[in-house]
Image: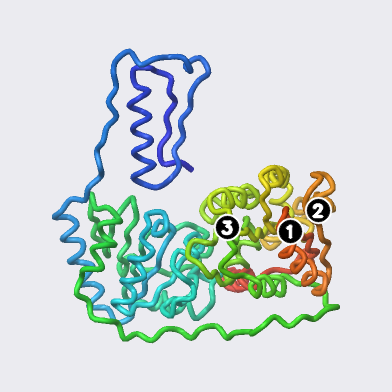
């Protein structure tokens, strides 16, 4: 989970190890871990230390050759596509990738970990690519491409739709902070920032490839007041209320898969643990989001199992005056796991989640069983800006999102 670690046990090497880890954090834009033993807190380095000030640089010839090969591959292609990954946000390259797409008229996609890295309202945005979990039109557009420009994307099991993705490495331009590969050629010592900015300077004719059709707009959410709430209708109602003042924070499970189909209005306003899929991420992450940008209000989507792991971090939200809207998908257990192997080990104790504000002495709780309940609760939560709001949404244990249904249908064909 870290790009560098060090245990600062030796005063002779401690400063050098600190430098190494800090340089890695800057170089890769990922976490590092420093461990300081209690009996070394007062230790001093026996010699003066000057921190290193080396700035990573690309090898000029390697960068030049890589850009030339990328230009040739993209220019020869008839069906190119750009996939922007999470590192495009981490390295501040969203504007450059968007401009490159506009110059070349190549359709843009993202993966789940990089969702919202580029604007989902941009006319060249085609949707989220996630193998069989994604929309069929997006899957076909990406997998039929003869040049897939993967920029800052990690090819993980989740981003590849639980290994249902069909991407030919020989047709890829693949650039991350760790490597640069064009088809089967590897280029060393080329920084992703230099490569992406270099793409903007290439002379590439605009693509004439037509984009896949946009999903049909369902229009304004039409309430069916007495109907029991379902997962698909829950996400449809949430999608209807999202605007530029909100950041979506999704935890692991069907809340993450279902959130992939939500429309995010601003860049980088979608947070999820789609790499390590660590349960219990969403509540603490919503606190971090409001610390980073108090103007954004978190919409937290979390399953009941993940919620039980870290729910008391809402106490921290109360202490700091934060106001996330927490939607607990209460399906009485680990629904995603039920589709793998069902059994009593997937059941968890059913809490009165909406009563948590009584315990904390702050916040607002709502119990949701019907669409009328959901609509009234969301409207009240939006109006209650002084503290968190918690919606206990009762769902059938086997009711899942459209994304998880798509994945299940594809995987069933393999069996």
Towards the viewer: 95 or 205: 95
Q: Say what secondary structure mark 1 lies in.
A: strand
Q: Say what secondary structure mark 3 lies in.
A: loop
Label 3 vs 1, first from the N-terminus:
3
Name the residue tied to disc 3. Answer: 295
Label 1 vs 2, first from the N-terminus:
1
* x 61%, y 66%: residue: 259
Label 2 neighbourhood size at 10 Å, few (<14), some (14-19), many (20+)? many
Label 2 vs 3, first from the N-terminus:
3
Colour basis: rainbow
Residue 147 point in image, percent of width and height: 31, 73
Name the residue tied to disc 1. Answer: 328
Residue 50 point in image, percent of width and height: 27, 26
> Could you give the CA–CA distance between mark 1 and mark 2, rounded to whole angstroms?
8 Å
Q: Say what secondary structure mark 2 lies in.
A: helix
> Could you give the CA–CA distance between mark 3 and mark 1, rounded to whole angstroms?
23 Å
Label 3 neighbourhood size at 10 Å, few (<14), some (14-19), many (20+)? few
**Label 2 vs label 3, nearer the camera:** 3
Where does the C terminus fall, quadrant-wise?
bottom right
Q: Residue 353 carries which label?
A: 2
In the shown orientation, is residue 134 left or right of residue 125? right
Q: Residue furthest left?
A: 61
> Could you give the CA–CA distance between mark 2 and mark 3, rounded to whole angstroms?
27 Å
Q: How many labels does the image show?
A: 3
In the shown orientation, is residue 96 left or right of residue 127? left
């Amino acid at each position: 989970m870290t790009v560098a670690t060090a245990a600062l046990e030796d005063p002779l090497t401690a400063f050098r190890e600190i430098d190494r880890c800090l340089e890695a954090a800057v170089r890769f834009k990922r976490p590092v871990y420093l461990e300081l033993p209690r009996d070394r807190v007062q230790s001093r380095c026996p010699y003066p230390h000057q921190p290193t000030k080396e700035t990573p640089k690309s090898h000029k010839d390697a960068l030049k050759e890589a850009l030339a090969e990328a230009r040739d591959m993209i220019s020869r292609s008839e069906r190119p596509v750009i996939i922007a990954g999470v590192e495009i946000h981490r390295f501040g390259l969203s504007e450059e990738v968007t401009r490159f797409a506009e110059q070349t008229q190549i359709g843009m996609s993202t993966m789940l970990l990089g969702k919202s890295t580029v604007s989902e309202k941009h006319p060249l945005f085609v949707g989220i690519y996630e193998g069989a979990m994604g929309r069929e039109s997006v899957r076909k557009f990406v997998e039929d491409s003869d040049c897939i420009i993967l920029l800052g994307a990690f090819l993980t099991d989740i981003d590849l739709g639980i290994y249902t993705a069909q991407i030919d490495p020989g047709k890829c331009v693949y650039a991350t902070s760790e490597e640069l590969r064009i088809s089967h050629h590897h280029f060393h010592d080329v920084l992703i920032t230099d490569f992406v900015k270099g793409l903007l300077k290439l002379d590439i004719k605009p693509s004439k490839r037509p984009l896949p059709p946009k999903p049909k707009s369902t229009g304004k959410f039409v309430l069916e007041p007495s109907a029991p709430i379902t997962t698909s209708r829950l996400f449809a109602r949430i999608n209807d209320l999202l605007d530029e003042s909100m950041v979506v924070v999704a935890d692991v499970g069907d809340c993450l898969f279902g959130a992939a189909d939500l429309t995010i209005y601003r860049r980088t306003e979608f947070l999820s643990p789609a790499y390590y899929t660590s349960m219990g991420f969403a509540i603490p992450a919503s606190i971090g989001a409001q610390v980073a940008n108090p103007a954004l209000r978190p919409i937290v989507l979390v399953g009941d199992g993940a919620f039980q792991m870290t729910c008391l971090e809402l106490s921290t939200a109360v202490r700091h005056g934060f106001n996330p809207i927490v939607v607990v998908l209460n399906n009485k257990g680990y629904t995603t796991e039920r589709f793998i192997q069902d059994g009593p080990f997937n059941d968890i104790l059913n809490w009165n989640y909406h009563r948590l504000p009584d315990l904390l002495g702050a916040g607002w709780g709502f119990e949701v069983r019907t669409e009328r309940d959901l609509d009234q609760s969301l409207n009240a939560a939006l109006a209650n800006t002084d503290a968190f709001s918690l919606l206990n949404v009762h769902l059938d244990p086997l009711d899942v999102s459209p994304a998880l249904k798509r994945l299940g249908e594809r995987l069933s064909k393999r069996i």
